[in-house]
Every structure is written in structure tokens, then in C-alpha cells.
Amino acid sequence: VLVQRLPWRTIGLGLVLIGLLVAMIAALVVGSPPQPPAPFGLARSGLVAYENGGDLFTVDPVTGDSSPIVSGPEFDLNPQWSRDGLWVAFERKVKGDSGPGLLFVSRHDGSGLTQVTPKPLLSIGSYSFSPDGKEILIATGAAGAQGLQIAAIDGGASRRRNCWWSSP
């Protein structure tokens, strides 16, 4: 009976190569950097909103291309982005370029224009979207008689809170 010798060197070399391959795969999996979080806020659209002559525009800071969001005979000012970059809130003056104003929202391209406040507000100081983007906090009034109002961006119910504080 003839017995063939096992090729121990070939088997050993094969095992070494398999071991190196497993070590390389493990190094790639363990050594790869963690993935960054998904973009949020203005990272989504990357556009900058601004007012010019009572109309609202966006500009792409990379290309410099500008396009209107809201234009017309009304005087619109102070565009503010929602945190997800999908909505723009802005004040629209009732008469001319001064006096009481209404708060509106629209999508970043001007669609979905919605009046947020049911009646004109005196001296809108500032406004900001809630973290979930469904409401806006509005600070109104003159020094010594400020008020806060929370309004839904769909134009639904709003809540008013009178707050009295003095400015330094």
C-alpha cells in the first residue's frame, strides 16, 4: 500500500494566508472611523435668506445664484429659517414699510405661503421656530410692555402670554 505524504508546507502556508486575511478584515472593521451624523439645520438646503426692497430672496453661497422666495407689492422683512431648513418665517407689514405686522411662513422655494398670526401685531421684536418646527415663539411690544405669543405654523390656534420685564 502506498501512502501519499501530506503537503504540510502547502497546508501551513494556506493557513497562514487565511489567518492574515482574517486579521486584515478585522483591522478594517475595527479601525474604520465612525460615521458622522446626518446633516441638520441649514445643512439641508444650504441657502441664505435675505430681504431686499421688501421682497425675500435666497442665495446659494457656493454658486452665488439668487432666487426670490416671496415678492410682490407687500413689504416683507426679516426672514428666519426653521431648524430643518425647510421653512422661512417672515414679517409682512400691514401698511407700507412700518407699523404693525403679520407673521407668515413659506417653504424655502416660496410655496406653502401661510399666515401664522390671525391679526396684526405691534412691534414684532423677534421670532424663532420651536425645535420640532411646528410652532413659532414671537416676542412683541414696546419696552416695558412685552408679550410672548406661540403660534402654529399652519395658521391654527395661537396662545398669547403677557410678560412684563424691563430692558436694561
Image: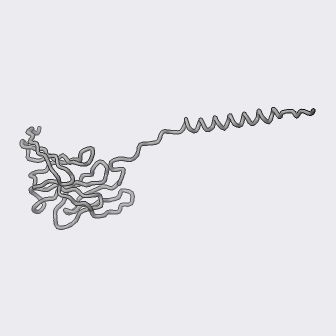
Relative placement, left or right, of 17 versus 43 is right
Residue 74: x %, y % from top left: 16, 64
Q: Residue furthest right?
A: 1
Identify the residue at the far bottom of this view. 73
Q: For residue 86, which quarter of the picture? A: bottom left
Q: Is residue 80 above or below residue 26?
A: below
Number of marks in the rendered image: 0
Q: In which quarter of the image is the N terminus?
A: top right
Residue drawn at x 36%, y 50% is 43
Name the residue: 33% across, 50% down.
42
In the image, residue 113 above or below residue 160: below
Residue at 29%, 48% in the rendered image = 83
Return the residue nearer the eye: 3 or 23.
Answer: 3
Q: Which of 153 and 58 is in front in this view?
A: 153
Give left or right: position of 123 versus 46: left
Residue 82 rendering spot, x and y as whole percentages: 27, 50
Which image quarter: residue 146?
Answer: top left
Q: Which residue is drawn at 30% across and 61% down?
A: 109
Quarter of the image with the C terminus in it: top left
3 displayed left or right of 130: right
